[in-house]
Image: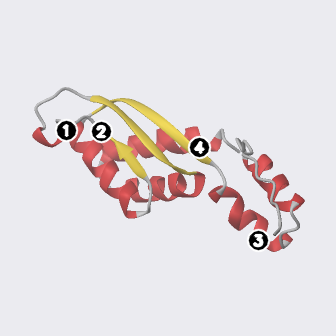
């Protein structure tokens, strides 16, 4: 019976991801495809209009991520609130693309998210 050594590694940036993927001997042509999938980030957005929060959640769910929104969001009675957007760097990038297809207020959120994920690189 073989024994395996397992450990958790902390990948924060694309450079970290590329290095770790390279170090295990992956095909160099696949590194840039896999690296954005190796980075999981949670982004907190404050003061989001609840209608927008619902749209962001639906778009992120459609690409396999998640968004935590206030429990009463669907009643649309509350003031703007904070949300947590959870996903891989690849999912966050896809979300930005999806959000850019919506109305101006959502496009502004897309620009803010694009700036945040740009910093991960």
| Left or right relative to 84: residue 58 | left
Question: Is tag 3's residue or tag 4's residue first in the polypeptide sequence?
Answer: 3
Q: Identify residue for label 1.
A: 73
Q: Quadrant of the N terminus?
A: bottom right
Residue 26 is situated, as x and y percent measured from the top left of the image, at 83, 69
Helix, strand or loop under label 1? helix
Between marks 4 and 2 in the image, the one whose residue lies nearer the viewer: 2
Classify 102 as above or below 106. Answer: below
Of residues 62 and 49, the one nearer the viewer is 62
- Mark 3 packing: few (<14 Cα in 10 Å), some, or many (20+)? few
Question: Is tag 4's residue or tag 1's residue first in the polypeptide sequence?
Answer: 1
Give the label on residue 30, or none: 3
Q: Identify residue for label 4.
A: 117
Q: Residue at x 10, y 39 (%)?
A: 75
Residues at discs 3 and 4 in contact (Cβ within 8 Å): no
Question: Is tag 3's residue or tag 1's residue first in the polypeptide sequence?
Answer: 3
Question: Is tag 4's residue or tag 2's residue first in the polypeptide sequence?
Answer: 2
Q: CA distance from mark 3 to mark 1?
A: 40 Å
Classify 1 as above or below 44. Answer: below
Residues at discs 3 and 2 in contact (Cβ within 8 Å): no
Q: CA distance from mark 4 to mark 2?
A: 20 Å
Q: Identify residue for label 2.
A: 69
Question: Is tag 3's residue or tag 2's residue first in the polypeptide sequence?
Answer: 3
Residue 18 is situated, as x and y percent measured from the top left of the image, at 80, 56
Helix, strand or loop under label 2? loop
Q: CA distance from mark 1 to mark 2?
A: 7 Å
| Left or right relative to 46: residue 11 | right
Helix, strand or loop under label 4? helix
Classify 75 as above or below 33. Answer: above
Helix, strand or loop under label 3? helix
Residues at discs 3 and 1 in contact (Cβ within 8 Å): no
């Amino acid at each position: 019976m073989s024994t395996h050594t397992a450990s958790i590694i902390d990948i924060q940036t694309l450079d970290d991801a590329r290095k770790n993927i390279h170090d295990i001997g992956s095909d160099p042509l696949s590194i840039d495809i896999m690296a954005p999938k190796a980075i999981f980030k949670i982004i907190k957005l404050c003061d989001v209009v609840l209608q927008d929060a619902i749209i962001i959640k639906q778009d992120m769910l459609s690409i396999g991520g998640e968004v935590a929104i206030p429990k009463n969001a669907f009643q649309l009675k509350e003031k703007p609130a904070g949300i947590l957007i959870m996903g891989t760097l690849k999912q966050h990038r896809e979300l930005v693309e999806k959000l850019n297809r919506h109305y101006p207020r959502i496009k502004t959120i897309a620009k803010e998210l694009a700036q945040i994920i740009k910093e991960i690189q």
